[in-house]
Amino acid sequence: MEAAPSLYRGGGMIITIHNAKGGVGKTTTTINLGVNLAAAGQRVLIIDGDRQHNATFGLGCDPQPGVYNWIVEGRFEPVSVRPTLDLLPSARKPSWWEQSTLDVVTRRFRELPAYDWIIVDTNPSQSDWVDSVLKISDAILIPVDFGLYAVAGVSELIEDLDSSRIIGLVPVRYDLRNNVSIELLEQLKHMGGSLVSPPIRISVDVERAAARGQSMAEYNPRSKMAEDYVTLTEWMVTTLAERIEKHPHR
Ligand SMILES: Nc1ncnc2c1ncn2[C@@H]1O[C@H](COP(=O)(O)OP(=O)(O)OP(=O)(O)O)[C@@H](O)[C@H]1O
Ligand SMILES: [Mg+2]
C-alpha cells in the first residue's frame, strides 16, 4: 500500500487504531474489527497496547502483563480468546511503554508468528510505544467522535502522522437524529474525503457488551451498531485491497 515494505514477516497486516484524543472509540473499534475478522475465519492477533487494559477486559480476559513480557523480555505468549483470535493482554503494571524504542518494537513485530491481521489498540497519551507502533504500522485507522472540536482535532492529528499510512477516519457515536452529528459528518467528509469510512451509530448496548467480554455482533447481532461494525470491517478490507492494487510495493 506504500513504498516501504511491511516489516512484518508473517504475511498479514499491522493495523493500529489511534487517536491522540481519549474516549473516542479506539478500544471498541479494535475489539469489533478483531472479532469480526476472526468470525470470518481470519487469523487475528489483538495487541492491547494500553495500560488501562480495556481491550483485555472487553474481550473477557483478566489483566496480565502479556505486552510487557513480549516487549521487555521477548516472550510472546498470547491468550486464545476466540477460535482464530489471539490476544496479547496488558495490565496496569509493570510498564513497557518507556522501553518501546523504535528498535525494540521493530524487532518484536518482525518476530511475530503468522497472522492475517494484527490489530493494535493504543492509549491516547504520547509515549515511545505509541510513536514506535505508529511508525511501523502498515495502516492507521482513526476513530473520530462527534464532540465539539472533533474535526479540528483530526486535521491536526493527520498533520502529525505519516498520512500515507492513514487508511480511514471512522465516525463513531453517530446519531442520525442529531443535527450536530449530521453537520460534523459533512465537515469530516469535506476534510477527509474518501478516507471517511461508513459511520458507527450510537448505541446504549456497547457497555453491556464490554461488561460481558463480547463484541457487538456477539452481544446482539441484530443491533445497528453490530451491523455498522460489519460494514466497517468489509470497508477496511476492500479499501486496503484497493490501495495494495494501486501501490503494489509491499
Ligand atoms: N458507538 C458507540 N455508541 C455509544 N457509546 C460508545 C460507542 N462507541 C464507544 N462508546 C463508549 O464510549 C466510551 C469510549 O469508548 P472506547 O473505550 O472505545 O474509547 P477509547 O478511545 O478506547 O478510550 P481511551 O482513550 O480511554 O482508551 C466507552 O464508554 C464506550 O462504551
Ligand atoms: Mg481505549
Image (cartoon, helix red, strand yellow):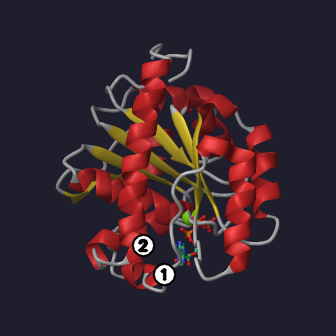
Q: Is residue 100 visible?
A: no
Q: Position of residue 12 (x, y in %)?
A: 34, 31
Q: Going 32% across and 26% down the picture, which residue do you hit?
A: 11
Mark 2: secondary structure: helix
Seen in the image, is 217 located left or right of residue 153? left
12 is higher (above) or lower (below) than 97: above
Q: Is residue 194 visible?
A: yes
Amino acid under disc 1: Ser
Q: Position of residue 27 (x, y in %)?
A: 51, 63
Q: Where is residue 64 in the image (x, y as percent from the top left)?
A: 41, 62
Q: Going 67% across and 39% down the picture, which residue do you hit?
A: 131
Q: Name the residue under label 1.
A: 203
180 is higher (above) or lower (below) than 101: below
Q: Quadrant of the C terminus?
A: top left
Q: How crowded is mark 1: few (under 14 residues within 10 Å), some or many (20 or more)?
A: some
> What separation in Å lies between label 2 and label 1 (alpha carbons)?
6 Å
Seen in the image, is 51 located left or right of residue 215? right
Seen in the image, is 202 located left or right of residue 221? right
Mark 2 near ligand 1 (CB under 8 Å)? yes
**Front-lying residue, 194 or 160:** 194
Q: Name the residue under label 2.
A: 225
228 is higher (above) or lower (below) than 78: below
Mark 1 near ligand 1 (CB under 8 Å)? yes
Amino acid under disc 2: Met
